[in-house]
Image (cartoon, rainbow, N blue to C red):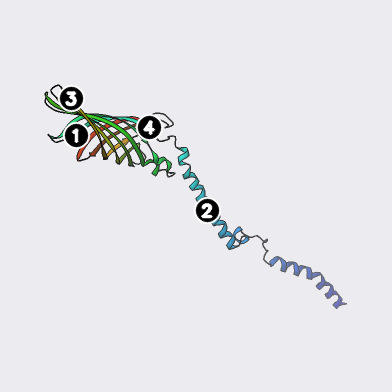
């Protein structure tokens, strides 16, 4: 009877012991994994490479839009004038006034890079000056017509509208001379190869809000080589750039 009673007590106590053991055991966490554990290492590296390439392509696309966002088409004109020091056998130089017209093409705008597109332009220019030598009885009147095409390399002053430029060009000079002796006049004309080089300062401030029209002004020094003659001018220019 006693043995049967002990057996009943043990049977009743077993669930309590089992529950106590379960309570003392650590609580297992759910099967949670991080994103890095879900994606294998190779796939993760591949995805990072794709993201980096997408960022580079997006950046390149933004840079290539510089030409589309530019309000200017890069063409313009100006009037220039100043003092021409004509090479003279009589006194070394013969100071004269000159006047000219110039067409400008900013061909650097064909370059997508935002900085380089501001650095290159070319001028198609014409100017004339006249000189007179001799006495009232015997004298020579000479008119010089110069035509040149001259590309230029500009260095902008940061983000300002000013730049410094160097320019080299070539063209031809048409000279017409009239020699007068008393009442007799003889005219002669001819052309010579003309080489041009010089430097200057160029400004292009916007005169409308969106920048589609800009004022162009210059201060420059140029030399012209025509045969064995070397002429120099100091001048300024004023015009528009669209």
Q: Estimate the x, y position of residue 83 in percent, counting from the top left.
A: 21, 31
Q: Estimate the x, y position of residue 182 in percent, counting from the top left.
A: 12, 23
In the image, is residue 154 above or below residue 80? below
In the image, is residue 241 above or below residue 30? above
**Element at badge 1?**
strand
The residue indicated by pointer 4 is 76
Which circle, 1 or 4, is nearer the viewer? Answer: 1
**Element at badge 3?**
strand
The residue indicated by pointer 1 is 86
Indicate which disc residue 53 carries. Answer: 2
C-alpha distance separating marks 2 and 3: 78 Å
Residue 139 visible in the displayed image: yes
C-alpha distance separating marks 3 and 4: 41 Å
Q: Estimate the x, y position of residue 34 in percent, counting from the top left.
A: 61, 59
Which circle, 3 or 4, is nearer the viewer? Answer: 3
**Label 2 or label 1, whichever comes before in sequence order:** 2
For the C terminus, give its image quadrant: top left
Residue at the (72%, 69%) spot, across then down: 21
C-alpha distance separating marks 2 and 4: 40 Å
Tell me the quarter of the picture where residue 223 sits. Answer: top left
């Amino acid at each position: 009877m006693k043995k049967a009673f002990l057996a009943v007590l043990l049977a009743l106590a077993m669930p309590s012991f089992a529950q106590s053991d379960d309570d003392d055991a650590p609580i297992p966490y759910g099967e949670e994994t991080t994103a890095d554990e879900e994606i294998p290492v190779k796939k993760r590296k591949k995805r990072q490479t794709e993201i980096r390439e997408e960022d580079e392509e997006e950046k390149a696309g933004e840079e290539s839009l510089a030409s589309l966002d530019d309000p200017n088409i890069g063409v313009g004109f100006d009037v220039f004038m100043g003092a021409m020091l004509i090479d003279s056998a009589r006194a070394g130089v013969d100071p004269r006034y000159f006047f000219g017209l110039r067409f400008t093409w900013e061909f650097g705008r064909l370059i997508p890079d935002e900085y380089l597109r501001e650095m290159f332009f070319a001028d198609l220019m014409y100017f004339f000056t006249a000189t007179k030598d001799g006495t009232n009885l015997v004298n020579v009147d000479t008119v010089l017509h110069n035509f040149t095409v001259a590309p230029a390399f500009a260095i902008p002053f940061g983000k300002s509208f000013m730049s410094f430029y160097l320019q080299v060009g070539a063209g031809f000079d048409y000279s017409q001379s009239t020699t007068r002796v008393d009442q007799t006049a003889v005219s002669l004309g001819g052309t010579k190869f003309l080489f041009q080089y010089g430097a200057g300062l160029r400004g292009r401030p916007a005169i409308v809000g969106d920048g589609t029209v800009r004022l162009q002004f210059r201060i420059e020094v140029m030399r012209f080589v025509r045969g064995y003659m070397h002429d120099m001018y100091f001048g300024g220019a004023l015009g528009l750039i669209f």
